[in-house]
Amino acid sequence: MSFGKDRYLFIKPDLRIPVSEVIWRFNPSGGPGGQHANKSNTRVEAELVIDQLTEIDDQIKNLLMKKLGSSVRVIEDSTRSQNRNRNRALQRMEKILITALHVEKKRKPTKPSRKSNEKRLEVKKRRSDLKADRKPPELN
């Protein structure tokens, strides 16, 4: 997979961010792994500085900065391959941006229908009768 200018993070159908605007840093991953872990820079740190993005408008930038801060940083070191870690970091970054721009629909309060209300009252009545049958008869 290429990480050049032709690759994009697809956030919405009309919004995409070029991967070339992502700042990359590579380090050796921590933990066990012997020589491979000590010699290979497989840990990936991807950072996207929101106010420096060129292909999105200021309104979206402001919304992203309000929800995420001035930058989005993702660290990935789950695999032994730098390339796979890069791809996973981009996928996580894409998810973070999509989630930040998702706007929940405002809920319209509704009333229960007449039928559902009648059904609820009928169930309550049946239950009440069932419990009333358990009581001992009253003595006069």
Image: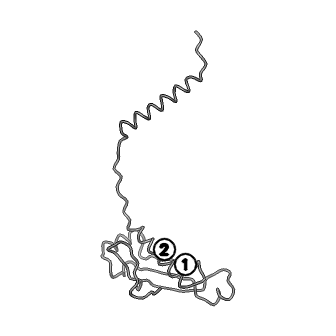
Residue drawn at x 44%, y 32% is 121
Looking at the image, is mark 1 or mark 2 earlier in the sequence?
1
Q: Is 22 left or right of 37, judged from the image as shown?
A: left
User: 132 or 31, which is in the foreground?
Assistant: 132
Q: Is residue 54 above or below residue 61?
A: below
Residue 21 or residue 51, whichever sits in front: 21
Give residue 129's mark: none
In this figure, which colouring scheme has been used for the structure? one colour
104 versus 56 height, above or below: above
The quadrant of the picture occupied by the C terminus is: top right
- Badge 1: how crowded within 10 Å, few (<14), some, or many (20+)? many
Give the residue at mark 2.
92
Q: Residue at x 55, y 27 (%)?
A: 130
- Residue 87, image x, y percentages: 50, 80
In this image, 78 relative to 23: left or right? Answer: right
Q: Is residue 48 left or right of residue 77?
A: left
Give yes or no for contact between labels 1 and 2 (Cβ–Cβ under 8 Å). Answer: yes
Compared to 99, does 51 lie above or below? Answer: below
**Label of residue 76 in the image:** 1
